[in-house]
Amino acid sequence: MEKRKKGKRVVKASAEPRDFLTDASRLRYPEAGPKEREYLGDRVRNARTMRGLTLRDLSSRTGIDLDALNRIESNEMIPPLGELVKIGKALEMKMGFFVSPGVDKPIAVVRADERQPISRYGESRSERYGYFYESLAPEKANRAMEPFLVTLLPTDVEELSTHDGQEFIFVLEGEMKAQVGDQIEFLQPGDAIYYDSTQPHYVRCVGGRETKILAVLYSETK
């Protein structure tokens, strides 16, 4: 259920959590500016219609079910980053366009006090289960990489995911468990992992405490 309050659009979740790249539950939108924001779902819908595709066409190309796509385009649900990669490939666009199109300039600077966290759950639920992330380059157009500062919160769910591209993760605080294929690694602060996203994978924090990571995603549009 969606509600507006003082320029904010809030979407509460009901699904069980998964790792931060595969979780298809809902996100809380960041605070809107003076003008009505063009949301991620609007960008997906506009890109799809511009290419003359139906929702059923997009579902066939991505493997995402029709109900989920309809909720995404209606701004009732934010897809996980892995599904954005699939949508971007199906629409021949970089997934970063849907996160934030940015502007045409050579550099983009995000100050520490200007980052906008996006929570995967309502506040009370995220404290126990979810995660939130902050885009570190939302104002740069045509990004070849997507850097995020991610806070992983405790969960017992371990569900493998696959999608195009590659991922780099650097652990800043806490401890993280990563599985890629049959290989399992436990990473401490200062440790890093780089893997092909086409391999079945998941990541989550361990030890009952939140973990902060720098995550960089890369995927080709074709």
Image: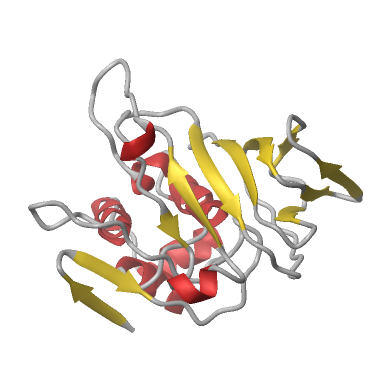
Residue name at image x 65 percent, y 66 percent: 18
Vertical relation: 152 (above or below) 142: below
Q: Is residue 102 left or right of residue 135?
A: left
Task: Decide which of 199, 77 is in the foreground and name it.
Answer: 77
The answer to whether residue 205 of the structure is visible from this angle is yes
Q: How is the image coloured?
A: secondary structure
User: Where residue 214 sits in the image (x, y, percent)?
Assistant: 59, 36
Query: Residue 31's quadrant in the figure?
Result: bottom left
Residue name at image x 57 percent, y 66 percent: 130
Residue at the far top: name it.
106
Residue name at image x 85 percent, y 49 percent: 181
Vertical relation: 25 (above or below) 1: above
Q: Is residue 191 left or right of residue 8?
A: right
Query: Residue 109's quadrant in the figure?
Result: top left
Residue name at image x 55 percent, y 36 percent: 219
The answer to whether residue 74 of the structure is visible from this angle is no
Vertical relation: 153 (above or below) 140: below
User: Where residue 154 sits in the image (x, y, percent)?
Assistant: 68, 64
User: Where residue 179 sits in the image (x, y, percent)?
Assistant: 82, 50
User: Where residue 83 sits in the image (x, y, percent)?
Assistant: 53, 57
